[in-house]
Amino acid sequence: MTDTASYPLTWELDSLYPNPAQPEFTAILQDCKSALEALVERVAQLADAGNPEQDAALWADFLTDYQAATAELSGLFAFLECCCAEDAHNKQYQVLMGRLAGIRPLRENIETQLQLTLRELSAETIQQFCEQEPRLQEIRFFLEESKRGATLRLPKEQEILASELAVDGLHAWGRLYDRLSGDLKIQLMEKGELVERSPGQVQFDSPQRSIRENNFYAANKAWDTIADSCADALNHLSGTRLTLYKRLPVTDHLDAPLIYNRMQRRTLDTMWSVISERKQKLVRFLEKKAELLGLPRLCWYDLNAPLPLAGAESAELTYDRACELTVNSFAEFSSDLRDFAERSLRERWIEAENRAGKRQGGFCTTLPLKKQSRIFMTFTNSADSMSTLAHELGHAYHSYVLKDAPFVLSDYPMNLAETASTFAEAVLGEQRLKAAQTRDEELQILDGMLGDSVAFMMNIHTRFLFEDRFHQERASGELTPERFSELMLAAQQEAYMNALDDSGWNPSFWISKLHFYISELPFYNFPYTFGYLLSLGIYALADTFEDQSEFADKYRELLIATGCQLTEDAVAGTFGYDLSQAEFWNKSIDIIDRRVDRFLELADQAD
């Protein structure tokens, strides 16, 4: 690695699939649809194939073809998602995404029939099938997990109908939000001129408070113009789910996301309980940050403000430099992670250019048959953007580790996916901290790390409380935009322990936060916090290994286990933690407390 290394800012998509505008792409899409239609016919035969000695090969052949077709479908979705994200105004891409979404019910039909058939088989019969056929033994966890997943399935005909209706119902509301947010323009004053920016281009980390404040109010003014439509989307997303839950053997709206994340209720409850008990030290961090910024208390738009530190690095962080720092930091953990990151950057798996017309946010998506991933983000020459890069590379590394696993065992729950991404951030953060040369530089890095702690333990907690409560109220009827804002304000004040200025909250946050509108998954929030605290605890274990390569190997074992074990089992089987007990979560937060103590110590030192 040299200081003159240059990394591409834009990704390469042409090697993945033909351009969506070309007939070759349409042909691939049609072939995928035909393969799934054939599997719909074949899956029905499995209901009468319950004899392990006679039918094991039939099951294995079907599941082999099922994996091939669904892996192709997953890759097509990933590819079109990339196309739509880099060109948010391209109507043709949006039409094709809608067409591809129309194929989704075929896959869901197959999954439904498969799960319902497995629901009727005893655990002993499934074991006998696996003993008869090595291909089934290899994916035994998938069979057992599919049987468990049948808890969230309606009777066959109802489930198939619900899946078909979701294209123009549940998932259509998510696509509506994508279009609304993609088309949104925010008017800002820059150098005396009024300019339009997409949401992803608006920064809230300027050192000038007037800019942060103006950007905040300008953005909210724009978001408020679509508040009514967003309220409709939220009402109907949650309303549809609640209607389905009434007909399923679930206790409440949290059962489904817990099943999706393969985790137990007591693990979630324990995590939030420990967080609530131990937030006070983060409040001290926020108070000290306000003091350093010369403010009585922080406002929402101050949370990501840089500290006024004369001795900290003041030059803009270029993309090349961010890539170098990230790769070099990964090298301190393992050569495997370093080499993977270098390859991803060099082979143009990453879209990071800051330009108009892109969708907001960032993501990592994987194309299973290509054994590649693509990362979408907007690099804004900041340490925060560098953390995002590391975060998404963590996701991509997770997929890379599982690239040779059977497709059905490469599907891991979101909470463990977020463990890999936040672990990569932790690797970057700790290496930067160790390399800090001055008080101000160390303060700056700690500010970023503790800002992450605030995000995961306060911001994400806000989202969880808000979503939990609006689901409770939605059971009695639709909510108005004003009520959504009231619930959001109350959730923020509780999650942040009233640490912000009385006039500094963000009641409109529910409009701008994409995660509430993801139709495939409810509660796209607590898995982030879970992954963050789990990654902290695991990273802390590195010091207990004399051979760091042994620790890196153990980490790989955990990532592999995420595809073939329940969450608690994956962690207990590799690192020995019982996630349902407070001890583990307290150990993770101990690390955060030590960082706060160091931050306060440095802040009180003379310059």
Image: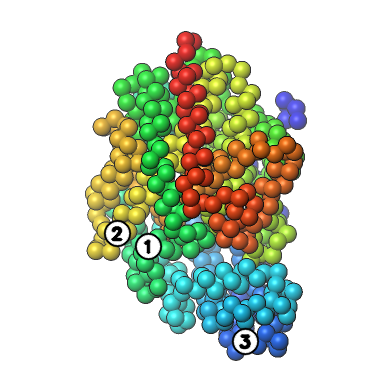
Image quarter in which the N terminus is found: top right
Residue type, numbered disc 3: Gly
The residue that disc 1 covers is: 253
CB within 8 Å, label 3 to label 1: no
Most foreground residue, 136 or 90? 136
Q: Which mark is residue 472?
A: 2
- From the top left corner, tell me how far across and down residue 347 is, in percent: 72, 44
- From the top left corner, tell me how far across and down residue 146 is, in percent: 56, 71
CB within 8 Å, label 2 to label 1: yes
| Between discs 3 and 1, the one toward the N terminus | 3
The residue that disc 3 covers is: 50
Q: Is any atom of residue 187 visible in this view?
A: no
Q: Is any atom of residue 433 visible in this view?
A: yes
Among the 4 quarters of the image, the one containing residue 322: top right
Q: CA distance from mark 2 to mark 3?
A: 41 Å
Count up the numbered dots: 3
